[in-house]
Image (tube, helix red, strand yellow):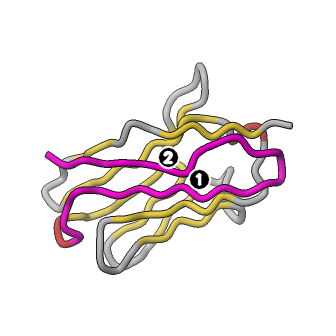
């Protein structure tokens, strides 16, 4: 079992920036990918961005050019830099870790609210 903890959410005005962090209690050697998902009120959870061993990344089309996912080379930590935030980015953001044996571990989520 792994513990996944997110941090960095909050309230920000449209056009502003936030940086989310996620740390997993796993050796980086046991991690295949880490990613950020979000779930807005009344909607399904969706992929925002993920990053794989070797550094390849994927982004949802709605965040491309505004969000950047990055990882730590030494530990199971991932960041999501969110710029030019829009009200439609408001959601609970979850971090998911997929292990090398294909188990998924989720964090509890962190609320991001974009509002004036």
The residue to which callout 2 is attached is: 47
Position of residue 14 relative to residue 56, above or below, is above
Q: CA distance from mark 1 to mark 2?
A: 7 Å
For the N terminus, the quadrant is: top left
Residue 24 locus on image (x, y percent): 29, 56
Checking the image for residue 41, the label placed there is none
Point out the stretch of residues depicted in magenta: 1-28
The residue to which callout 1 is attached is: 60
* Residue 27 quadrant: bottom left
Contact, mark 1 vs mark 2 (Cβ under 8 Å)? yes
Which residue ends up furthest to the right in the rendered image? 116
Residue 19 lies in magenta, yes or no? yes
Q: Residues within 10 Å of mark 1 (few under 14, many from 20)?
A: few
For the C terminus, the quadrant is: top right
Which residue lies at the image location 43% right of the left edge and 48% below the top edge?
Answer: 6
Residue 90 lies in magenta, yes or no? no
Judge from the rendering whether residue 62 lies leftward or rightward of residue 51; answer left or right: right
Residue 12 locus on image (x, y percent): 75, 45
Which residue lies at the image location 71% right of the left edge and 65% below the top edge?
Answer: 65
Position of residue 110 relative to residue 61, above or below, is above
Count of numbered tags: 2
> Which secondary structure lies at badge 1?
loop
Judge from the rendering whether residue 17 lies leftward or rightward of residue 13; answer left or right: left
> Which secondary structure lies at badge 2?
strand
Of callouts 1 and 2, the N-terminal one:
2
Residue 93 locus on image (x, y percent): 52, 42
Residue 45 locus on image (x, y percent): 49, 34
Q: Residues within 10 Å of mark 2 (few under 14, many from 20)?
A: some
Which residue lies at the image location 58% right of the left edge and 45% below the top edge?
Answer: 9
Judge from the rendering whether residue 114 lies leftward or rightward of residue 92; answer left or right: right
């Amino acid at each position: 079992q792994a513990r996944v903890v997110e941090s960095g959410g909050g309230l920000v005005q449209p056009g502003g920036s936030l940086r989310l962090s996620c740390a997993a209690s796993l050796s980086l050697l046991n991690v295949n990918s880490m990613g950020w998902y979000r779930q807005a009120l009344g909607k399904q959870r969706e992929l925002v961005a993920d990053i794989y061993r070797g550094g390849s990344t994927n982004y949802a089309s709605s965040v491309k050019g505004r969000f950047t996912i990055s990882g730590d080379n030494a530990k199971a930590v991932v960041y999501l830099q969110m710029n030019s935030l829009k009200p439609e980015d408001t959601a609970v953001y979850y971090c998911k870790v997929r292990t090398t044996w294909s188990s998924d571990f989720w964090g509890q989520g962190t609320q991001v609210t974009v509002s004036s």
